[in-house]
Image: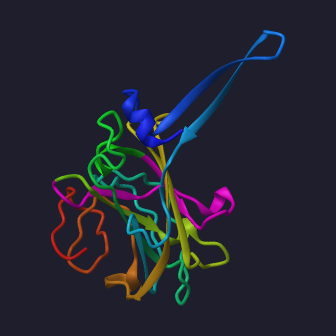
Amino acid sequence: MTAALLKSLGLPVLGRHTLEVQAFDCAGNMGQSAVAFEIVLDGPAGSGVLTVTTTTTTGHDDQGKGDDKDGGDHDQDNNGHAGDSSSGTVTVVLTIPNVPTGSPLDPQSARDVVREHGGPPRSSTRARARARRARLSRPDGTTLTLTFKASDLAVSNSVGTHFELTGRFLSTTGPAFVAFANTSTTGGTGGSGGGDDDHGKGDDKGNGDDQGKGNGDDKGGG
């Protein structure tokens, strides 16, 4: 079973498929069986599908009340600790070219991503989380930038050096993807108030800290 065969049959490549087979034995008795399988879009480490950067900060996290308007989920933040990689953010860039399989029936780009979870590979579910913020980084929809709170992903105060992003296209039961990347780390410090982060309404004032009072517009380099 190949992608070319599925495309030639007018079928999508990604997603769930059922293959039914009929066979006859030497006595002419017919047997029938079916096997179900799922084809997943795979992005191994080094493929360029996924890049991950961890930014460590000093200070602690606040428990704001607002919702970020860029599309991420917003749970209450956990307290961070200065000097460990759980006190910061993890920025994940997912790049999916238009029609990655070549089939017009498959998802077209990163624009079709509807659900994602990220975290260290092969870890407990406690170390995996949904992004706090999601935005398309290019007008053609090929690049999706996701922002995670490092504390949501940390195990023993560390987010690790390897990252896995899984998710689905089109719907919560639609075609799946999985991508891997090695993480790179940059340093940073909190802003006024000791580097407090809340999850307000998404206003970045130029120093990377959400102020919790805005209206969803980025106003600087956040």
Q: Position of residue 178 (x, y in %)?
A: 51, 55
Is residue 171 visible to us here? no
> Residue 153, relative to residue 56: is it above or below?
above
Q: Quadrant of the C terminus?
A: bottom left
Q: Nearer the viewer, residue 41 or 208?
A: 41
Q: Is 139 on the left or on the right of 85, as rendered?
A: left
Q: Position of residue 212 (x, y in %)?
A: 30, 63
Seen at 38% across and 69% down, the residue is 48
**Is residue 35 rendered magenta in the image?**
no
Q: Nearer the viewer, residue 136 or 206?
A: 136
Q: Is 83 on the left or on the right of 218, as rendered?
A: right
> Residue 21, relative to residue 203: is it above or below?
above
Q: Quadrant of residue 193?
A: bottom left
Q: Quadrant of residue 84?
A: bottom right
> Residue 93, relative to residue 55: is it above or below?
above
Is residue 23 visible to us here? yes
**Is residue 131 rendered magenta in the image?**
yes
Seen at 23% across and 65% down, the residue is 203
The magenta region covers: 115-139
Seen at 40% across and 85% down, the residue is 194
Q: Position of residue 18 (x, y in %)?
A: 58, 26
